Image (cartoon, grey):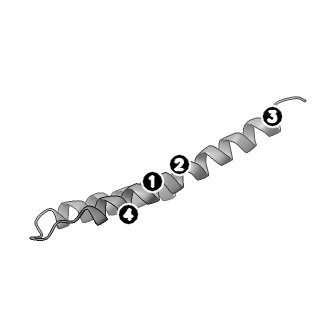
Amino acid sequence: MILSGGQSAIAGTSFILLAHAPSQEIVNLAGYAAFGAFYFLLAARQLRLINSAESPR
């Protein structure tokens, strides 16, 4: 989560800086979304592993 938060802070800063650029592209947003999806999947996998380890069988 710390890594994801750091990545979000960097992405937010870059969005602010790129907002003033003459050529704004959707690629910047797509990259941010891809990293967010990756971190979401990592967190979901970790939670699933924790829940499966804690639940009795």
Within 10 Å of disc 1 (Cα), the crowding (few <14, some 14-19, many 20+) is: some
* Picture disc at residue 40: 2
C-alpha separation, residue under disc 4 versus residue under disc 3 = 35 Å
Q: In terms of secondary structure, where does tag 2 sit?
A: helix
Residue 52 percent across, percent down from the top left: 79, 37
The residue at which mark 1 appears reads as: 36
Instruction: First in sequence, mark 3 or 1: give its number.
Output: 1
Above or below 39: residue 14? below
Q: Are marks 4 and 3 in contact (CB under 8 Å)?
A: no
Q: Are marks 3 and 1 in contact (CB under 8 Å)?
A: no
In the rendered structure, the answer to whether residue 55 lies left or right of residue 48 reads right
Residue picked out by circle 3: 54
Compared to residue 22, the image places residue 7 above or below, namely: above
Q: Which residue is disc 4 drawn over? A: 31
Is 21 placed left or right of 31 in the picture?
left
- Mark 3, Cα crowd under 10 Å, few <14 / some 14-19 / many 20+, is few
CA gap, disc 3 to disc 1? 27 Å
